[in-house]
Amino acid sequence: MVVPSPQLAVIGGGQLARMMQQAAIGLGIRIRLLAEAPDVSAAQVVPDHVVGDYTDLDTLRAIVADAPVVTFDHEHVPPEHLRALETEGHACRPGPHALLYAQDKGDMRARLSEMGIPCPRFRMVTTAEELASFGFPAVVKTTRGGYDGKGVWVVRSAADADEAFASGRSLLAEELVDFRRELSALVARSPSGEVRAYPVVESRQANGVCAEVIAPAPDLDAGLDAEARAMAERIATELDVTGILAVELFETADGRLLVNELAMRPHNTGHWSIDGAVTSQFENHLRAVLDLPLGSTEARTPFSVMVNILGGAVEDLEAQRAVVLAAEPDVKVHLYGKSVKAGRKVGHVTAYGSDLDDVLARARRAAALFTDGVTHD
Amino acid sequence: MVVPSPQLAVIGGGQLARMMQQAAIGLGIRIRLLAEAPDVSAAQVVPDHVVGDYTDLDTLRAIVADAPVVTFDHEHVPPEHLRALETEGHACRPGPHALLYAQDKGDMRARLSEMGIPCPRFRMVTTAEELASFGFPAVVKTTRGGYDGKGVWVVRSAADADEAFASGRSLLAEELVDFRRELSALVARSPSGEVRAYPVVESRQANGVCAEVIAPAPDLDAGLDAEARAMAERIATELDVTGILAVELFETADGRLLVNELAMRPHNTGHWSIDGAVTSQFENHLRAVLDLPLGSTEARTPFSVMVNILGGAVEDLEAQRAVVLAAEPDVKVHLYGKSVKAGRKVGHVTAYGSDLDDVLARARRAAALFTDGVTHD
């Protein structure tokens, strides 16, 4: 038997690739996956997968050999490998020239500032003296490799930055922004240049990790809403991003928007769209990277709330599923097939409806039952 | 590495199993599949699959060995094998005692009539004389194995039934019903006895095959709507069906309901629910057979229209996808990964919205583009 060639290679086998596969099944897109280990989240649901190391160029070459397009579950593939794949004729989407700005926060800050996109005040710092001259309080970040609060230090004195400097990593200092809340603007963009913006959402963090997302961001000023969407569309276009771009934003206490982070892949702040939008971010990511026409990014419902399921007291999520569905039969459950570790993202739930308080309460209750086995209300 | 045991064995690798897998990914349910061939529709998306013959008991035993529950993509597994699996401690859902009534139309007619459920007038016929005494016109059906118009003859004389009698199969004669339209009432039922009814839909056939489905059935009399749902709930309960039960109905010219067929699995007339209902029939099938609490069967939108993609002039559905999405970016596309053969169900599309004419037009246009490469309007 001859198995048809895949239409898309996906590097990385986490939950983002898993949810891409759900969308790919509907569209009839055959995915080949490079998985980090035999039973990672996406490898459980993509038959055509190979276990290997995404930092090894020959492994990447083997995976993409007969796939016309390559996309990613994460932003950690070495850019020089992506450039090599491009030279060899593979379409990397997003390409290394764009992905750079999701991989390196220093380059991102410099580029966005050049474009006149509002960012927190920043400077690259290599010494405690440079940091002191930047001023305190400050946020010190490694320019590469940080995520979910890792590689980020809030410093109020030079001594607070000892660990950061000891890391030996390239460091960026940023002003500690006095923000009202965090927003996220997602867009999908195709190589042909079609761009579609999702409703701007509010993202609530706990311990540096996205805890819950409300779509759309409640009571968002119409001007800021339009500005956030326009900013995300412009960044996607000028950086030549293909696929989903997430622009994480601060809404400052004095009512401005500042860009916090960029992500170039489906993003936690867009998971609500699976159940709450006409076209999910995963479907639009696939459509975008394959240069298919994009689908509507409009919400199907007045409010959607996504709450992450973080590893907690409940060890057996499959057994707990019955408890959650009994308590909240209409909350949509998304489990990632991952083993439970403290604080690890192992799934999410989404509730939707027209009464935000009710929607919030239902989503939180379901997530709490998955996390702790008890509700908090 | 130890791969965790599957939670569910699915027998049969067609599009129904494929769409079950889409729902299973969200719920975090691990499926093991028995596929008819290496690259059938569901085998493309279920890594844990075995290729084998579902009429071979030892093959079935191997598939279900470490799976607590077994369900089905079709109704063709020999009942004696299912009874053997039950004796050996496996939960078959639906069980052979229920499935019998989806497998054998004669037993179905007899049982429903005993229950007082309205059916077309019928009689088992073994000779042309018996058929003549039943009267003409009549519909002659093989009691087993027919589907999509196969094994069904409309006869106006004894001579018209020659092919049917020559088949050597057990035959049922039924009155030729003067019907206004065909309806379908779907319910999900769990072993605990929870039952949820979907909105009653209108199903339009072409050449004996379901062509399109409108949810809900337009302008359906409220009394008939309630009667159809109640009938489906009662059949599910009294026959002890687990999972999805589809009751295909005639709405007669004089305003009565008659049961046409029963199916005990997700059904073509329920595909709209993937995009149009709070909980899809595939998710509720999985929740039902695993005895998890069921989700809401309510529609999310005033009208959903599903149109099947039948094999036609377009040979490369993947290439055609770009054309369809350009013409109808918000129609939801479901391709089954099957090669195109004339008249074969290779996918479906669903449109939804509040203007039925518009929804119908969009769904038909998208399906026509997939089938013939041209629209018909």
Image (cartoon, coloured by chain):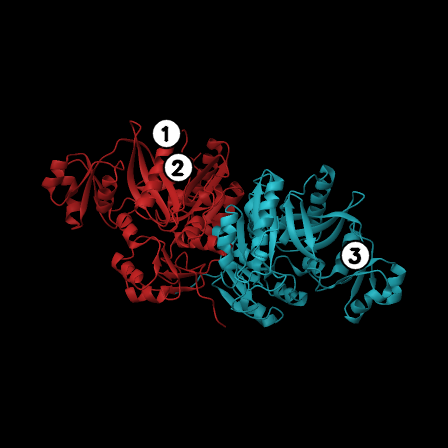
Chain colours: A cyan, B red
The CA distance from mark 2 to mark 1 is 14 Å
Mark 3 → mark 1, Cα distance in angstroms: 68 Å
Could you say where residue B108 lies in the image, as x and y percent from the top left? 25, 45
Q: Quadrant of the N terminus of chain A?
A: bottom left
Do tags 2 and 1 sit on the same chain? yes
Residue at mark 2: chain: B
Q: Is residue A295 visible?
A: no
Q: Which amino acid type is shown beneath numbered disc 2?
A: Val
Q: In terms of image quadrants, where is residue A64?
A: bottom right
Judged left or right of residue B372, residue B55 is: left
Give the mark toward the camera: 2 or 1. 1
Disc 3 and disc 2: Cα gap in Å? 57 Å
Q: Residues within 10 Å of mark 1 (few under 14, many from 20)?
A: few
Mark 2 vs 1: CB contact within 8 A: no
Residue at x 48%, y 61% (from the top left corner): A5
Q: Nearer the viewer, mark 3 or mark 1?
A: 1
Q: Which mark is residue A110?
A: 3
Q: Percent x, y for residue B151?
A: 24, 46
What number is the disc on residue B35?
none
Viewer-proximal residue among A195 and B107: B107
Residue B223, disc: 1
Looking at the image, the residue that sits furthest to the left is: B129
Image quarter for residue A214?
top right
Amino acid identity at mark 3: Ala
Left or right: B157 in relation to A200: left
> Which chain is home to disc 1?
B
Sequence-first tag of 2 and 1 = 2
Give the residue displayed 32% in from the left and 48% down from the top. Answer: B240
